[in-house]
Amino acid sequence: MLVLGLVPISYVASIDGLFPSAAARQQYADLSAHNAGFVALYGRLHGSSLGELVAWRGGFIPVMAGLFCILTVIRHTRAEEDSGRRELLGSAVVGRHAPLAAALVSVFAAGLVLCAVLALGMIGQGLPAAGSWAFGAELAVTGWVFAAVAAMAAQLTAGAGSARAIAIGALAAAYVLRIVGDVGALDDGTPSWAGRLSPLEWVTWIRPYGEDAWWPVALTAGVAVALALGAAALSTRRDLGAGLLPPRLGRPAAGPALRSPLALAWRLHRGLLAGWAAGFAVLGVVLGYLAASVADLVRDAPQMADVFARLGGAAGLVDDYLAATTNLFGLIASAYAVQATLRARAEETSGRAEAVLGTAVGRLRWLGGHLAFSLLGPAAVLAAAGLAMGLAHGLNTGEAARQTSRLLAAALVQLPAVWVLAGVTVALYGLLPRLTALGWGAPVFCLLIGMVGAAIGLDQWVLDVSPFTHVPRLPADRFGVVPLASLSAIAAALTAAGLAAFRRRDLPIP
């Protein structure tokens, strides 16, 4: 959360350097405000001041704030019940609502700190104080409302994985609704009904460095408080360790399909894999459909023809947009790879792995079933994104077959970098099992490097730490075998180290 507050601060110098005059900023704002691709990624732009451009460019950061808050709340509520620690605490002099309240108070306080860090940083860059505090409040209340959504999800299901899926699904739905509402507002300036349903749309009504409206802050914070109170009320209507939604009963005896560790892993991972693949397909359709609008920049801005020519013209701009989008898909897919790997750790700490390993199943066979989804699952979700994006863009351009094959390749070329981050998590699981959750730090670090590394002028060696820096930027650049082979070798070495350590260490390690 603290790092998220530093990201927009890095945009100030970058945008000021690219557009040093008010006329240049106005020209850029006029182009961007009516471009469907930019509006889908960052939201609507209502002004051309430096502060407004910075706040608009940080339009994806509220989504990340919401994701971090969701993961934190689920970790300290539903996951604590799954592990049995919540029951242990409840046997002492601890109130029923204390764990939920502690998680929400911690996340809400982190939002306030995020607000202060961002506001003070922006003021230090010479931007107006009122707009800076409004910008900070935008990120804070976004985190609050999705923290409360996570608190509600924690009451509905009997497992942390299902609760995460519900809350992250709500976040994804809010993002899609925001895109639909903002793109629909390009005609008359009024967001559609779909956008009005999304908290990610509500916070854009604050308009930092423009109107600096505070009523959307109060609206979003009020919804967050109402959801938090609702979660507390629902927690009294269920048993500890259970959920309000009844679990689906399974067969009285295992079917023939559960005869191997891989089949068991498929049963455990299939819901997660299907959800990720569906989400990637939906985002692929939306972002692929909007790719054609990037080419409109050349047509609508002949006065910037020289700049666009240096970027490769209309085709070069579209290919750069597609390369950046597939790279983003790769970064997100690495989060799925980490999550799939962590499922093995959850099976170990719950005691279920020990029961399986007490039979004739060997350690490597058991862990290999989970790693199949850590390594091949990202291929499935990236393929879904590439196919969906290629079809959507190809139908727009009349080149469905060509664009589908190009973008499928552009998506799948991200796999070696994803495997490196999966390998980091496997190595942690084998060597330092209690620190396996630190595997989340790798995709977060790579995401931050991708978002702000070049903008703030980091040294090349820092940028090179991220494996995604070495992935060929298809379809904008040429395909290269050497970097992909190198990344695959690194991933294999990390995975082998984790497997060797897991084979020799004690089990389970709580």
Image (cartoon, rainbow, N blue to C red):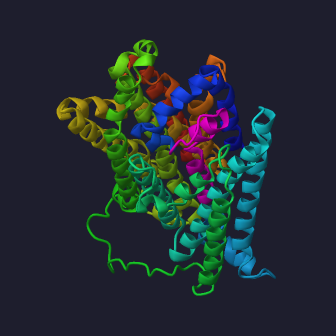
Q: Residue at x 27, y 29 (%)?
A: 406
| Closer-to-camera residue (478/343) | 478
**269 to the left or right of 432:** left
Q: Is residue 182 above or below residue 49?
A: below
Q: Main secondary structure of the magenta part?
A: helix
Whether residue 474 is visible to the viewer of this picture, yes or no, is: no
Q: Residue at x 68, y 65 (%)?
A: 218
**400 to the left or right of 81:** left
Q: Residue at x 46, y 21 (%)?
A: 486
| Closer-to-camera residue (216/505) | 216
Residue 311 x/y as whole percent:
43, 16
Q: Is residue 407 magenta?
A: no
**209 to the left or right of 187:** right
Tell me the magenta residue range.
44-73
Tally the marks. Answer: 0
Q: Is residue 60 magenta?
A: yes
| Closer-to-camera residue (259/306) | 306
**59 to the left or right of 378:** right
Residue 230 x/y as whole percent:
61, 79
Residue 392 x/y as whole percent:
27, 41
Whether residue 259 is visible to the viewer of this picture, yes or no, is: yes
Q: Residue at x 65, y 51 (%)?
A: 139
Where residue 288 sits, quadrant-wise, is top left
Residue 344 x/y as whole percent:
51, 55
| Quadrant containing the C terminus in the rendered view | bottom right
